[in-house]
Amino acid sequence: MTDQTASWIAADRRHAWHPFTDQAEWEKSDPLILTRGEGVWLFDSEGKRYLDANSSIWTNIHGHGNPKIVAAIQEQAARLCHSSFLGFANDKASELAERLCAFFPNQLTRCFFSDDGSTALEVALKMSLQWAQQNGREERTGVIAFDHAYHGDTLGASSVGGVSRFMKGYGEAGLSVYRVSSLEDLRALPEIVIKTASAVVIEPLIQGVNQMRPWPKGMLDGLRAWTEEKGIHLILDEVMTGFGRTGKMFACQNEEVVPDFLCLAKGLTGGTMPLAATLTREEIYEGFRGPEKTFYYGHSYTGNALGCAAALANLEVFEESQVLEEVERKGALIESRLREISKVLEIRRVGLVIGFDVAQGTGKEVCQALKNGGVLTRPILDTIVIMPPLVISEEEIDYLLDALAVV
């Protein structure tokens, strides 16, 4: 280990606090200091390379250092990094809002920017609840959510999540949440719950933190029909599934469903900059027009020009490449190879979103062995997540599966 690497590790141990991490265990480890990325690879301070098998927590789409996105960031940084979106507009935010809404023409017509996946959900929840209160539906103060869901770590987003360890310390503070496990449970809810619910929130097609568990086919379409029948908003959390992960630009397009709120983050900038967006319908927007109906919510970096420039370049890369056309084939290839590995138990997959189970109590051990073999990912309990950048090649898939085979 070089002196420089040792000094960075020492500084981290003295001052840094890492998310979702047992710090007592962390302080005894020698963490990787990642200093560079290229394509699907990350490089540490000692020069060793690692395949980024979970896209740096599900964010990277076109590989690290994509030249088009890097050039867009550099050009924008020289012009304007940030200006207030409160009382002003900027060119990149205007263009990006128009581009995102164009995926759902005449349906999702308004875009509210924020910073990350949690805040995208906060925006949708607060908009739905406030809209109900000032548009003649004062009784609708509740939210229906699904067991084992994960929607982020801010107060509102975590309170509609269904994983207890992420609510520790404050629970469901501030929101009335009704939990269901399936579409059948939803249809069996008491009438009083249905009449007092403002929105239903779900991760479409597949739950992420719930060990990568897909919903039954047709479930999302059935949910959309139910919410329309009951006059309840549908919030889709596409923070993980958006931007090509499922083989469509957005997961909801697999069942031709358009929600009332679409929450986007992670892959929005191709994994380069923090940025989130919440898309919604014109009738929702109309319910906030006027001085007594203002949506009092925002962040200092709302509409950040640098992030918006990166997101526009990300969309251009999608247009110029055939990356979406290859998602299902690559996902199926990885799945077929996984089935040949004896330690792999159940496999769950949608597109290039893959989780597979290993023996009870071995999830961390498997990921540590993978790291030693040049592959980085994280377990969810004893489920190993494989969600590489969409641009992963067949040779790189071979590298990934070969590393798994010898763990």
Image (cartoon, grey):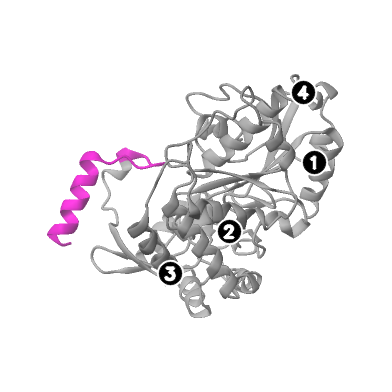
Which residue in the structure is indicated by mark 1?
183
In the image, farthest residue toward the right? 229
Q: Tell me the chief SS of the magenta region.
A: helix
Q: Earlier in the sequence, mark 4 or mark 2?
A: 4
Label 2 packing within 10 angstroms: few (<14), some (14-19), many (20+)? many
Which of discs 3 and 4 lies nearer the camera? The answer is: 4
Q: Quadrant of the C terminus?
A: bottom left
* Secondary element type, mark 1: helix
Residue at image location 47% in from the left, 74% down from the top: 402
The reply, left or right, for residue 289 in relation to residue 4 is right
Which of discs 4 and 1 lies nearer the camera? The answer is: 4
Kind of residue at badge 2: Phe
Relative to residue 399, is residue 3 depicted above or below? Answer: above
Q: Nearer the viewer, residue 326 or 19?
A: 326
Which of discs 3 and 2 lies nearer the camera? The answer is: 3
Mark 3 and mark 4: span between their CA atoms?
47 Å
Q: Which residues are magenta?
A: 1-24
Which residue in the structure is indicated by mark 2?
356
